[in-house]
Image (spheres, helix red, strand yellow):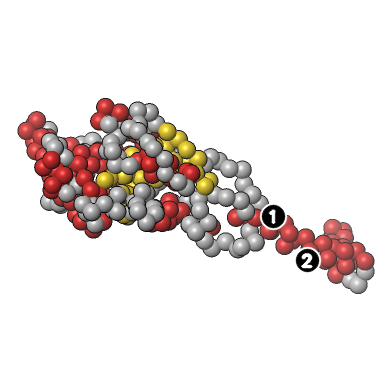
Amino acid sequence: MASSTALGQWMTVLLGPNLLAIFVGSLLVLGLPVLVHYFLYRPRAEQGLPTFLITGPSGSGKTTLATYLERGSCSATHTSQAPLTVEVTLPAVAVPASSRYRSSNDPTLSGPKRLLLVDTPGHGKLRYIAMDRLVERKRISGVIYVVDAADLSDAAHEDRRGGGLQRSAEYLHDILLLLQKHSLKSQKSRGSKATPVLIVANKLDLFTALPTPLVKIRLEAEISRIRESREKGLLDSGIGVESATEDGDEKDILGEPDSDTFRFSQMASVDVPVHIAGGYVTGADGPDVQQWWRWIADQM
């Protein structure tokens, strides 16, 4: 009874016309918005820069692309023998997806947005470097797969054994299959995280380059052929497609096993969305890389 009486006295003091009530009320009115803004918009310690892995067959223009995105200009490059990591600043025209709906007065928007690009060798004997990075998956925000759009035509395929289309499709198949396996394994452990893939149709400024839609069609058709060939290899070995896809924890057939053809859209169901965009770095009228910048910003 005494406690309720004391509480009533305190409420009377706080709600009454006195200096203490005015002070407490002013403190709440002025201080509460400040505290809410501090906790909602305070800058957080950076957990590490977003990292994008650049990969693709040798000669597709990976190092030239990484160099241009870093410096804003082109320079002479040579065939990579080791991975190269460069720090890149996102241009002002490319707004990160996480910042598009924030207030212009938000302090977290101040300063340039930085990211890392890891350029990996494309030679067949060195592709394990990119595959190992994908297995580790340390802060990988996305994969940028570069193909030479001028090396995917029928003429380029006939000029040399194992032409650009076959080499590009085989490497892309292996990367997508690795990401698919990891995604399915993560889904079972409730740790799934989407790994977006950008297929860069590079060198579109060249006369012999295929347009972006045709690059997509050619790659899907070639990957379908590769998948069929590898499925046949499983059957010939006595394993069988059903045992390969049902008994294990990982899927050994890329895309939808029940589908006769492969489509990049099938990868969305395993949290590996694939997007393709064309452009060029060393064109006569200057580079065309805006679509690639926008995709990178969408993943940040």
Residue 241 is situated, as x and y percent measured from the top left of the image, at 13, 40
Q: Report helix, strand or loop for mark 2.
A: helix
Q: Is residue 34 left or right of residue 82?
A: right
Q: Report helix, strand or loop for mark 1.
A: helix
Q: Residue at x 50, y 53 (%)?
A: 91
Residue 279 to residue 87: above or below: below
Give the labeled residue for mark 2. 29
Q: Is residue 135 left or right of residue 101?
A: left
Q: Residue at x 28, y 36 (%)?
A: 58
Give the labeled residue for mark 1. 38
> CB atoms at circles 1 and 2 under 8 Å apart?
no
Q: Amino acid at mark 2?
A: Val
Label 1 and label 2: CA atoms lie apart by: 15 Å
Residue 177 visible in rendering = no
Q: Residue at x 77, y 60 (%)?
A: 31
- Position of the N terminus, as image quadrant, is bottom right
Q: Residue at x 48, y 44 (%)?
A: 71
Q: Amino acid at mark 1?
A: Tyr
